[in-house]
Image (spheres, rainbow, N blue to C red):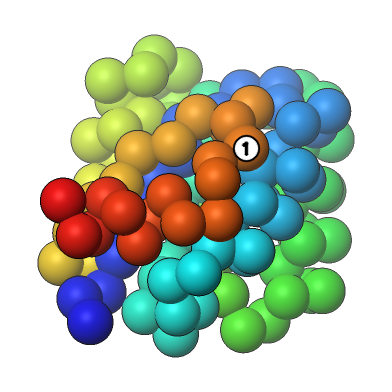
Amino acid sequence: MPNVSIIIPCYNEQATIGATLQAVYAQTYPRAEMEVILSDAMSEDRTREVIAEFQRAHPDLPVRIVDNTQRVIPSALNRAIEAASGEIIIRMDAHSKPYPDYVENCVRA
């Protein structure tokens, strides 16, 4: 199975980022073949704390944060793509809750 990088731009998403990460964690695609890269536009709320809590609780899913100091979505995507190591890149939003087979279906397509 190909390695997948899930890239997620975010800014002040403390209310939703935990649910998004849980939805990624619940994917049917093997966790060993996925990584999550969050490109944060220097959030001013608890977004990074929520991400850190998720990282501690789920060490079997690699989750990294890159800084998006330009604070615009194109820059966020570029920073995340630069950091990605997957053969396939899947973009998600920080407030999305993808179906459990979303990554699997993206890879199949």
Which amino acid, mark 1? Lys
* Residue sitting at x 64%, y 27%: 95
* Residue sitting at x 75%, y 31%: 16
User: Closest to the observer: 81 or 15?
Assistant: 15
The answer to whether any part of residue 82 appears in the image is: no
Location of residue 104 in the rendering, given as x and y in whole percent from the top left corner: 35, 61
Query: What crowding class fits label 1: few (fewer than 14 Cα within 10 Å), some (14-19), or many (20 or more)?
Result: some
User: Closest to the observer: 8 or 70?
Assistant: 8
Question: Which residue, given by chain and number where applicable, does mark 1 sit on?
Answer: 97
Does 9 sit left or right of 74 as displayed?
right
Does 41 sit left or right of 25 as displayed?
left
* Element class at badge 1: loop
- Quarter of the image for residue 18 reads top right
Location of residue 100 in the rendering, given as x and y in whole percent from the top left corner: 56, 55
Location of residue 77 in the rendering, given as x and y in whole percent from the top left corner: 30, 33
The answer to whether any part of residue 18 appears in the image is: yes
* Residue sitting at x 83%, y 28%: 15
Using the image, determine if residue 106 lies above or below residue 55. above
Using the image, determine if residue 9 lies above or below residue 50. above
User: Closest to the observer: 61 or 67?
Assistant: 61
On the rendered image, what quadrant is the N terminus found in?
A: bottom left
Does 1 sit left or right of 80 as displayed?
left
